[in-house]
Amino acid sequence: MTDSYENKSVVLGPEYDDLLRTTLHTVIRRMNGKNISSGWGVGGSQEIDTELVQIGIEQIGIESETYIGLSIHGPSKLVDQIRDMVNAEYNPDL
């Protein structure tokens, strides 16, 4: 059984997918999410962008990392909700 406050991570898709990133940020804005912090770095051939977002009383982390993808992590219930909303809205064929 997964507790709603147990943390989890989900890779949404490739880090270079601009439509996926836009869809994620649209979902977060719709949920009244506020950016708390962001960062960027390079290590060898890998690039990483990070964001910390507040949604209600909870926080999620967003990471875009070369060779790993665009991922979100935080409380499992919130991560699952965001993943489902992104999947319902994301349509790369348009």
Image (cartoon, rainbow, N blue to C red):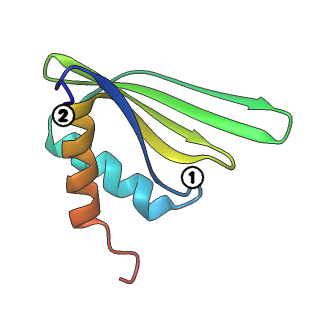
Drawn side of residue 55 relative to residue 62, left or right: left
Q: Is residue 8 above or below residue 11?
A: above
For the C terminus, the image quarter is bottom left
Q: Name the amino acid, label 1.
A: Glu
Residue drawn 33% across and 74% down? 91
For the residues labelled 2 and 1, say whether their Cβ atoms are less than 8 Å apart: no
The residue to which callout 1 is attached is 15
Q: Nearer the viewer, residue 44 or 33?
A: 44
Q: Name the amino acid, label 2.
A: Lys
For the N terminus, the image quarter is top left
Drawn side of residue 72 relative to residue 77, left or right: right
Instruction: Calculate the distance from the C-alpha at mark 2 to the C-alpha at mark 1.
Output: 23 Å
Q: Is residue 7 above or below residue 87?
A: above
The residue to which callout 2 is attached is 77
Drawn side of residue 61 relative to residue 44, left or right: left
Q: So how many labels did they put on this image? A: 2
Residue drawn 21% across and 65% down? 88
